[in-house]
Image (spheres, rainbow, N blue to C red):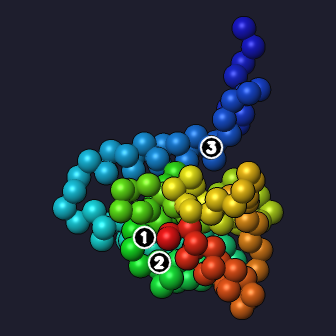
Amino acid sequence: MPAKNAEKEPGGFTAEERAAMKERAAELRAEGKKGAKKADGLQDVLDKIAEMAPDDRALAERVHVAITSTAPDLAPRTWYGMPAYADADGKVVVFFQDAGKFKYRYSTLGFQDAAHLDDGDMWPASYALVKWSPAVEKKIVALVKKAAS
């Protein structure tokens, strides 16, 4: 029987993917506790942002401010170990995936199916994010407004 590759088996998960799944399992266990859930969610998001590499952290901080000021009804929480923002039903609407999470060349601003971005038969559900600018901020604010409406 061949030895198993510890990094990634053919068709298997990378170490980063396994870590994200473990983080999600811990998040699901924590969701069972009500109490200070909202405050914990915000703190979890801030902690995840603080752990990021400097370039990713700078983007994540700006995204966090743009989302929380544009859609204050979306609750910050983590989702698969990433900063995310959920609606009143607890469904993730928008999330930020830093480039370092899965060793991508860009960060991603993603929208889940709870986002109200429907536009005909096809629309983008995620965006590559490399650098912050006033134009990027304007686009993110518009997307978040529409997604949270």
**Place of residue 139 in the rendered image (x, y in percent of width and height, measured from the top left):** 69, 80
What SS does tag 1 mark?
loop
* Disc 2: which residue: 71
Mark found first going from the N terminus, 1 or 3: 3
Q: Nearer the viewer, residue 137 or 27?
A: 137
Judge left or right: residue 32 versus residue 12: left
Is disc 1 in contact with disc 2, using a CB cutoff of under 8 Å? Answer: yes
Q: CA distance from mark 2 to mark 3?
A: 29 Å
Quick one: label 2, few (<14), some, or many (20+) residues within 10 Å? Answer: some
**Amino acid type assigned to the residue bearing label 3 in the image:** Glu
The furthest residue to the right: 105
Q: Measure how far apart labels 1 and 3 are at the Cα level.
A: 26 Å
Please state which of residues 116 and 83 is positioned toward the viewer in this rendering: 116
Q: Which mark lies nearer to you, 1 or 3?
A: 1
Q: Residue beneath label 3, please? A: 17
125 and 44: which is toward the camera: 125
Task: Identify the mark at residue 74; answer none if there is no mark.
Answer: 1
Q: Is residue 81 visible?
A: no
